[in-house]
Amino acid sequence: MKIKTGISLLAGLFLLSINAFSQDSNFYIFLCLGQSNMEGNARFEAQDTTVDKRFQVLETVNCPDLKRTKGTWYTAVPPLCRCKTGLTPADYFGRTMIANLPKKVRVGVINVSIGGCKIELFDKDNYQSYVSTAPSWMLNMIKEYDGNPYARLVEMAKLAQKAGVIKGILLHQGESNTNDTLWTKKVKVVYDNLIKDLKLKPKSVPLLAGELVSAEQGGACASMNSIIAKLPKTIPNSYVISSKDCPAAKDHLHFLAEGYRIIGKRYAEKMLSLLGYKVPGVK
């Protein structure tokens, strides 16, 4: 009887050790969400396709043409959102992170974003009422996440937690909520739900929110930046990322490829500083 008990104990310890080693504390995971600018609106260029293998993306949808499968990690060659999206702040966020982190550290991103959506789409308790009024072109994108982008983000994040540690959340959203004074509270609902559903500690998981195309660049929704600026008053561990001098497209809503590169680096600069790393300033 004692022998059987001993064997059972050893087997249990062995399984625990396997689980312990399956999660790499040097694999930093970042959740990305928002609307079209986080989704990636600009076409990526040749310079954007050479990526260090330490920077990875967890595919959130099936992309047969890219030979990618949902729930699998790949080197973070764009697109980083869905199968036919473009360059996103996440691209140069990840590149800048690994360039300034120790070689033993890897960086992974999970991007679930929907062009044109309001922040309400990520409210897990009320998203259905928003989806019921969404235009047909948006519904097709939402369907790629089985009708619930928030649930897909959480599903993928839980999968990622088996491989690494969630270190932060990147948000770029607000164009569709322009002048909505309740936006900061709505973002807090989403943030609090992610923290709870993923069993995270808010003090250890900052939220970085990017400004929209600036007034200086002729931003059509630049007035929203004054509301975004108030986010740290609602979520203590949140930080606003400047869009100053980030080149914008002719539609005055989206950034050009160079704009995505610049703001992506700024997301990384702030995250690196929060992680305790000193990095040279970026443009």
Image (spheres, rainbow, N blue to C red):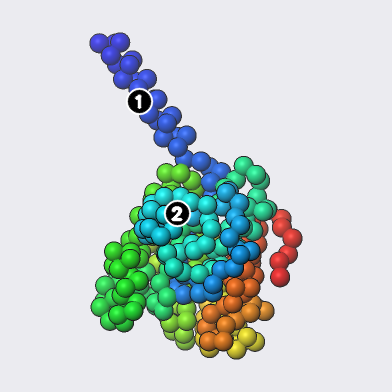
Residue 244 picture location, percent across and down: 65, 78
Position of 235 with respect to 267 (left or right) is left
Query: Considering depth in this image, is 216 or 51 the residue closer to the camera?
Result: 51
Label 1 vs 2, first from the N-terminus: 1
- Determine contact: label 1, label 2, CB under 8 Å: no
Residue 143 picture location, percent across and down: 30, 68
Which mark lies nearer to you, 1 or 2? Answer: 2
SS class, disc 2: strand
**Which residue is rendered at x = 45% and y = 64% of the image?**
81
**Which residue is rendered at x = 63% and y = 79% of the image?**
247
Residue 12 is tagged as 1
Q: Which residue is mark 2?
A: 58
Q: Is residue 268 above or below residue 34?
A: above
Q: Identify residue type, mark 1.
A: Gly
Residue 154 in sight from this viewpoint: no
SS class, disc 1: helix
**Which residue is rendered at x = 41% and y = 54% of the image?**
68
Q: Quadrant of residue 280?
A: bottom right
